[in-house]
Amino acid sequence: MAAAFSFLGMLLLSLVVALLAALQLGDYFGLTNEFVPVIGVVAIFAAATMAVFAVSYAAARRSGTLNWVAFALAALAIGLVSSPRLVERIAERTTSRHALGFENASITLEILVPALLTVLVQWGLVRRRWLRAAGEEDLTRWPWVTTVIAGFAILNPFGLAIVWSALREFSADWFKGFADMAMASGVGALLVVGLIECYIRGRMLRRRLATCLPPLGGEAKTPG
């Protein structure tokens, strides 16, 4: 029963993150009639991925299995939005201000970004629980701080305006030059910060694992 409540909490937390991202994207793109189907797809995807992670959690013999499951679910999310039928059927309902040739791209982002965030959050929580249950070190090299910073930097009206303008191919867009420079600088800065965080986390992980190694003829120490 405790495990069921734990996985339910993981699902709810991932849903909150995904819906916040979907709402930010929907507000920027002028989400209208497609709000219900987009949110429905995101919620169904979150429930399905949580079920897959729960089964993988019970069956996994090593934490690396959960990593491969996360990669497969991320690929599934990309494949889901790559299906023209799904996006086009939702686009038929839209009256957004980006409807002139950009409704498919905006709907794709409104589904893909929350779906990938769902997989990321669920993977982090399930992996941590599995490692703790196995008595192993649960620190990961994944740059979570950088991920949160990137989320706040992008998922706001100004950040979305920069990313959207940089991705579009309009020479008449006066904002595009600034957007291209800002996006390139932002991505570069995030990569540097992410690499630094990965390096720091790696050193922390090696030190924690070293404290767990038993000395010659002795017993292993527990971290912390």
Image: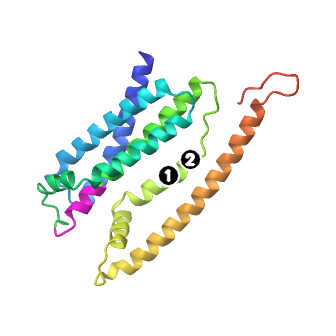
* Mark 2: amino acid: Trp
Quarter of the figure with residue 94: bottom left
> Would you place residue 63 above or below residue 103 in this image?
above
* Secondary element type, mark 2: loop
Residue identified by numbered label 2: 142
Q: Is residue 105 magenta?
A: yes
Residue at label 1?
A: 147
Residue 99 lies, with reference to residue 4, above or below; the image says: below
Apparent side of residue 131 relative to residue 220 in the rendered image (left or right): left
Foreground residue, 177 or 104?
Answer: 104
Residue shown at 39%/36% (left/top)? 13
The magenta segment is 100-109
Residue 128 in the image: x percent, y percent?
54, 33
Residue in front for this viewpoint, 129 or 31: 129
The residue at the point 47 percent across, 28 percent down is 57
How far is mark 2 from mark 1, CA to CA? 9 Å
**Residue 171 placement, left or right of 137:** left
Q: Residues within 10 Å of mark 2 (few under 14, many from 20)?
A: some
- What kind of secondary structure does the magenta stretch mostly adopt? helix
Please tell me whether residue 100 is drawn above or below residue 64 in the rendered image: below
Instruction: State the image coordinates of residue 75 (x, y, percent, origin top left).
Output: 39, 48
The amino acid at mark 1 is Thr
93 sits left or right of 167 in the view = left
Query: Residue at image x 85%, y 28%?
Result: 215
Asked if disc 2 and disc 1 are in contact, CB closer than 8 Å, the reply is yes
